[in-house]
Amino acid sequence: MTLSQIFAFAILTGMMGLFVWGRLRYDLVALLALLAGIACGIVPPDKAFSGFGDDIVVIVASALLVSAAVARSGIVETLLRPIGPHLSSTDAQVIVLVGCVTALSAFIKNIGALAMFMPVAFQLARRHGTAPSALLMPMAFGSLLGGLITLIGTSPNVIVSRMRADIIGQPFAMFDFAPVGLGIAVAGVIVLAFGYRLLPKGRKGTPSIDAAFNIEGYTTEAIVPKGSPSVGKTPADIERFGEGDVDVTTIIRGRRRVSPSDSTVIEADDRILLEGSPERLERVVAAAGLKLSRDHAEPGRSEAADEIGVMEAVVTGDSALVDQSALQARLYERYQMNVLAISRRGQRITNRLRTIKFQAGDVVVLQGNLKHLPETLGELRLLPLAERDIRLGTGRRGFIPLLILAGAMALAAFHLVPVSIAFFGAAVLLILSRALTMREAYSYIEWPILIMLGALIPVSDAIRTTGGTELIASWLASSAHNLPPLGALALMLVAAMAVTPFLNNAATVLVMAPVGAGLATHLGFRPDAFLMAVAIGAACDFLTPIGHQCNTLVMGPGGYRFGDYWRLGLPLSLTVIAVGVPLIAFVWPL
């Protein structure tokens, strides 16, 4: 073993130890590994930061933005609304939710697909009395399975494609993962459809910040524009979009108020007062084709769109707004601020928002320039609430994100442009179409993941160039020497599965992909099957809540404990091995 190899293994061992220790953030561990590599001389200074410009980083960042835009579009709610009332049994809910998450994860980042369906799962659980713990973990595991189907479904696929390009000069294409990934995903969904019964019953999730606020229903005012699908409908039709959580309290037609009833017909230019949570109100306004009523046009038309946002605040007793309405206080003229909704405990609001006189204790949703809103709230003696995601007044872009995503995938699938260019272009178009603002785009990018990738790519290359991966491969080859070809392939898959909870799935591929290719060479096999085994193994951590963000995301809301994951994860992992190994060998002959 050379001195360079000793340094490489020392850095790799130290990095794994710090990952397992868990006291330092994984992005900091990656930066320390890069610094150590530079100090030891195994990472040349001129290559130290090459990872941050790698296609992997561009693809992962762009895919996160595309996922966020699709999630915000409201398409999921629109497509599932007709079948929602029919999903009364837990079996049906698990099959539909897991199937949908798995399918969607093939085309957007798996954590984005999971985040889109979690609110739907909570709605179904609340409506039919299902325990959320029966739904969330199967959905998280389904999102990991769906990510196996395409190049962009999960980070390990993107990284192993780049590794293949380095090794044999040709990356994996967009749908090269589909034959194996689809087979594993179908088998996995079948296991999850029955296996959810292995999970403990009666677990309660961690209360969300929304539950901590416990704010009674907000009231907002919406206009029915000409051509809206709500024209000619009844108030009950509009309330259905809120799935029982939004009420039509009053209809203002000209100068008179109309009490909503089953015989009331909505007309164009009606002003409708809606009561519910901000999330539900936003959904109803979008789905019913309504337009929020503002004192004036949306503020800041002359300013950058990403500077306009909303905040929640409480009217204090010494606020200048007490006993004044928004019209009397001239909120827009003086502060370029609109009142979008008001919550008044113990009282239903039936007048136009602009005429409501504020009282101490009112909770309001205000829209304005986010640079100036905190200062304005202080001047008006309004107490800002803890930050949470309020989308009321931000609007939706319907099918635009889905069309842009389809275009990017088509360009990549037909090799018209590289994957990195296709998804970078998609991200830029989404921002240009205002499906996301620049402020939102920066917030949706998972910077720690990108930092870790950028730092570990040169370290991974250094382990390979020093001959370290060849050394590990020769050790594995000696262990696999007496195994049949499928046994050697299974060994590589299990090794990647075993390492990923401790290294993070992206780091696992960066370390294990060169090892897999080296093992294939030592055994006289083609590298493709072993690279595919590494990608699948790294993406399939079903045994712990820490190996993948999807598993971590459902832990609190589902009320799961660390030891709960193996109950469902172990049979699913065995299924992946049993189905995946022969499928890989069949599709990618050894």
Image (cartoon, rainbow, N blue to C red):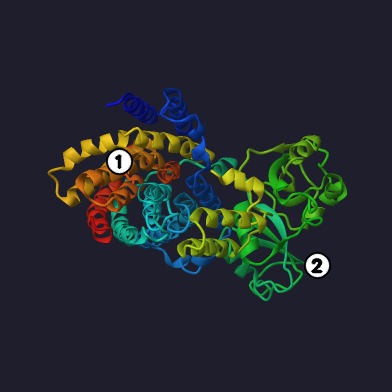
- Residue 343 in view of the camera: no
Q: Is label 2 in a helix, a strand or a loop?
A: strand
Q: CA distance from mark 2 to mark 1?
A: 76 Å
Q: Quadrant of residue 407?
A: bottom right
Give the residue displayed 36% in from the left and 35% down from the top. 465
How many numbered marks, from 0 up? 2
The part of the image, by quadrant, that contains residue 270 is bottom right
Left or right: 129 as drawn, with respect to 399: left
Label 1's element?
Answer: helix
Q: Position of residue 457 (x, y in %)?
A: 44, 38
Quadrant of the rendering where the C terminus is positioned: bottom left
Pointers 2 and 1 in contact (CB under 8 A)?
no
Q: In the figure, residue 280 lies in which quadrant?
A: bottom right
Q: Position of residue 484 (x, y in %)?
A: 14, 49
User: Where does residue 509 sit, x and y in percent of width and height?
Assistant: 37, 43
Label annotation for residue 256: 2
User: What residue would you read off at disc 1?
Assistant: 515
Count neighbours of disc 1 (C-alpha within 10 A) and say few if under 14, some if 14 to 19, many if 20 or more. many
Label 2 or label 1, whichever lies nearer to me, is 1
Q: Three-letter amino acid code at disc 2?
A: Arg
* Three-letter residue code for mark 1: Val
Question: Could you tell me residue 235's position as x and y percent?
Answer: 65, 68
Q: Nearer the viewer, residue 386 or 354?
A: 386
Of the residues under marks 2 and 1, which one precedes in the sequence?
Answer: 2
Q: Is residue 294 above or below residue 268?
A: above
Query: Is residue 521 in view?
Result: yes
Residue at the spot 52% in from the left edge and 59% down from the top edge? 417
Q: Is residue 119 above or below residue 516?
A: below
Residue at position x 34%, y 40% from top?
500
Nearer to me, 587 or 504: 587
